[in-house]
Amino acid sequence: MRRTSTSDGPAAITRILVLAPNWLGDAAMCTPALRALRRRFPDAEITVAARRAVCDLLDGLPHVTRCVTMPPRPALHEMTRLARALRPHARDLAVIFPHSFRAALLARLAGAQLRLGYARGGRTPLLTHPVPPYCEDGHITPVYMAREYLDLLEPLGCQDNDAGLELHADPDAVAEVRLALGDAAPVIGVAPGAAFGPSKRWPVECYAEVMNRLAAEVGARFLVLTGPDEADVRAALTKQTCAPIIDGPFRASGVALLKALISQADLLLCNDTGPRHVAVALKKPVVCIMGPTSPRYTESPWERGCVLRVEVDCGPCQKPTCNTDHRCMTRIDVESVIEAVLAHLPARSGHMT
C-alpha cells in the first residue's frame, strides 16, 4: 500500500491535535498509536479531542498532554465553536483517527497545518496527507483497528514498541474495588451488553446460566459491567441469576469505575464490545462471545483468552439488529462458554495487581 510522507522533522511539530475514535473499544485500540506518536514527538503537546467517555478512558495515559471533551456528532455551529477552542492545540498537526467527513472538516476548521487521515468518505480535499485505506481487489477491507491506527502514523515516521494496548485505572478507585472484593474466590467480570446493537448480545438467560454454574462449581463471584443505556440488560440478568454479584456502592462511577473493576477481575466474559478491549489493555484474560462482526477488526496479538464464534451463512453481517434468527449467537452453547472460562481463569492467590 502506498504511503505518503511528511517533509517536516520532529522539531517542527510541537502542537498536535488527535481526533480520537468515538467507541470505547476503538479508543482502547488507539492507545498504541498514541504511544508511538509520543515516542516520535517526545516534547510535543499532544491534545486529544473526544467525547467524555473516551476522555475518561484515556485519563492517566502519560502520552497525552490533555483531553478536550466534544460531542460525538457536533452540529455545524458547534464545530465552529469547537474549532476555535482547538485552534491553539492544532497548530502543527492534526491526526484524524475517525473515518468521518465531519472529523476531517473539524481538523481543517481548527487550522492544523498538517492534516493526516485515511482517504475515504469523500474527505481527501480536507487532508494534506491522505493515506490510502486497506483494500483487497479494489474494496476497503477490515484490518485490526490497532494496526490501522498505527499504520496511519507511518508518514510521520512513528514506530510502535509492541507493548500492546495500554490504559491506566485510577489508584483510589482500584483500592476501593480491591477492598470490596477481598481474596476469597474467583471474580469474573461479565459484560452482557453492546452499545452497537442487540445483534452483538449473547442471550441474557445464557449469561445467567453460566454465572449460576460457575458460582456452584468454583465459587465464582461476579461484577456485572453495563453502560448507562443498558439498565434493561442489567435488570434482566440480575433477575435471572442467583450467583453472587458484587455491586458496590463505589465512589467512582462511569468509565473510571469500569477500568477499576476490570483491573481487579480475574477474567472478563463479554460480547464483542468495549470492555473486551479495556480488559486487553489492562492485561486481563478475556472470553469473548462474537457474532455478527468480522474478527478481522479485533484479532489482537496481545489478547489473552479466546474468542468463541460459529461460522454462519449470513455472517459476518456487521448489522446492529439481526434480521433472521440470530444463529451466529444462539448456536454458541453454555457448555462451550463454561469450558472456555475455566480454561482461562487464573488461580487466585492474594490481592491482584
Image (cartoon, rainbow, N blue to C red):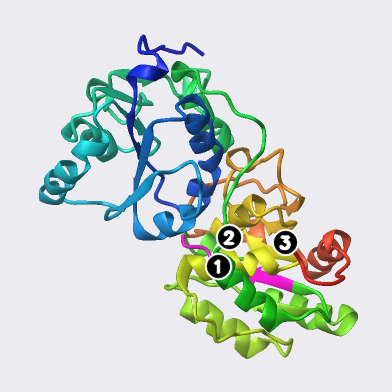
In the displayed structure, would residue 111 be above or below residue 237?
above
In which image quadrant can residue 183 be found? bottom right
Residue at horizontal 45 percent and vertical 24 percent from the top:
133
Amino acid under disc 3 = Arg
Q: In this figure, which residue is indicated by the disc labeled 3?
A: 331
Mark 2–mark 1 Cα distance, whole angstroms, equals: 8 Å
Range covered by the magenta-colored residues:
188-195
Q: Describe residue 319's horizontal placement relative to residue 189 as left or right.
A: left
The foreground one among 346 and 200 is: 346
The kind of residue tagged 2 is: Pro
Residue contact between numbered discs 2 and 1, judged by CB atoms under 8 Å: yes
Task: Please say whether residue 248 is one of the residues in the magenta stretch.
Answer: no
The residue wearing badge 2 is 275
Which quarter of the image is occupied by the C terminus? bottom right
Q: Which of 353 and 111 is in front in this view?
A: 353
Q: Position of residue 65 (x, y in %)?
A: 39, 44
Lateral position of residue 79 relative to residue 303, left or right: left
Residue 192 lies within the magenta run:
yes
Q: Which of 218 and 173 is in front in this view?
A: 173
Can you tell which mark lies on residue 340?
none
Residue 154 spot, x, y in % from top left: 49, 20
Per the model, the C-alpha gap separating discs 2 and 3 is 23 Å
- Indicate the position of residue 278 as horizontal and vertical percent values: 59, 55
Q: Are marks 3 and 1 in contact (CB under 8 Å)?
A: no
> As drawn, is 7 to the left or to the right of 326?
left
Q: Which of marks 2 and 3 is nearer the N terminus?
A: 2
Kind of residue at disc 1: Leu
In the rendered image, which quarter is residue 96 located in? top left
User: Is disc 2 surrounded by few (<14), some (14 to 19) or many (20+) residues within 10 Å?
Assistant: many
- Circle number at residue 258: 1
Residue 23 in the image: x percent, y percent?
A: 44, 52
